[in-house]
């Protein structure tokens, strides 16, 4: 079974590994291969070390950990970052290794983040996803509605990302089915 817990010192390498490996599997044939082929765990470790050490208020980083300490997923969120849309909370990232997807762990990770954001008096949630990302179906299943699109440039290619919104954080939590056994 996978345990969901708050990230702590020593987790940065595991989070960075999930981050890079999930990009390589999820975004293959969406983002240019050359960009994906040059992603390394090592290049992301310091970013995640800083995030873990940050005492940033209203932000959370949680991991999905298998017995033995192997991190297989993570999610993070906090205050909405751009201020262009009428949402106060944002799920910044949610990533799982390919072999543990479709088992309910993404829902558990997202729910931990959303419950924390709700405890911080945030009311309306936003998440951005690349238009061709299969996770868009996950966000729709969880009650998210497309509310905006914008262009983003990754690896020299222009892509479209979609903002999914929840008008009430309570609506997100109600959509979460029980987890599957691993």
Image (cartoon, rainbow, N blue to C red):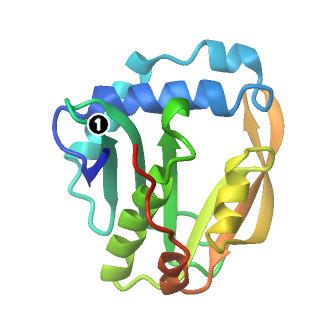
Give the camera-side residue of 152 and 163.
163
Residue at figure coordinates x 28%, y 29% from the top left = 70
Residue 9 locus on image (x, y percent): 16, 38
SS of the residue under disc 1: loop
Where is residue 36 shown, x and y percent of the image? 65, 20
Residue 12, visible in the rendered structure: yes
Where is residue 57 drawn, in percent x and y? Answer: 27, 66
Q: Is residue 139 above or below residue 116?
A: above
* Residue at point 65%, 74% (across, down): 143
Q: Is residue 162 left or right of residue 9?
A: right
- Determine whether 139 is above or below 17 in the image: below
Report the number of numbered marks. Answer: 1
Residue appearing at x 73%, y 44% in the figure: 133
In the picture of the structure, the residue carrying the numbered disc 1 is: 66
Along the line of sight, the residue nearer the viewer: 157 or 180: 180
Q: Residue furthest left?
A: 9
């Amino acid at each position: 079974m996978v345990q969901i817990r708050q990230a702590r010192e020593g987790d940065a390498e595991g989070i960075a590994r999930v981050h890079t490996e999930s990009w390589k599997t999820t975004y293959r044939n969406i983002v240019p291969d050359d960009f994906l082929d040059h992603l390394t765990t090592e290049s992301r470790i310091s970013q995640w070390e800083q995030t873990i050490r940050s005492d940033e208020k209203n932000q959370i980083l949680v991991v999905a950990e298998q017995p033995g300490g192997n991190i297989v997923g993570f999610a993070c969120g906090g205050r909405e970052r751009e201020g262009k849309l009428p949402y106060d909370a944002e799920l910044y990232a949610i990533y799982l290794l390919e072999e543990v997807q479709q088992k309910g762990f993404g829902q558990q990770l997202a729910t931990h983040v959303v419950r924390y954001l709700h405890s911080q008096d945030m009311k309306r949630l936003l998440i951005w996803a690349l238009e061709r990302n299969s996770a868009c179906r996950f966000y729709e299943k969880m009650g998210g509605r497309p509310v905006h699109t914008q262009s983003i440039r990754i690896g020299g290619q222009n892509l479209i990302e979609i903002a999914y919104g929840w008008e009430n954080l309570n609506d997100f939590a109600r959509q979460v089915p029980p987890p599957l056994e691993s």
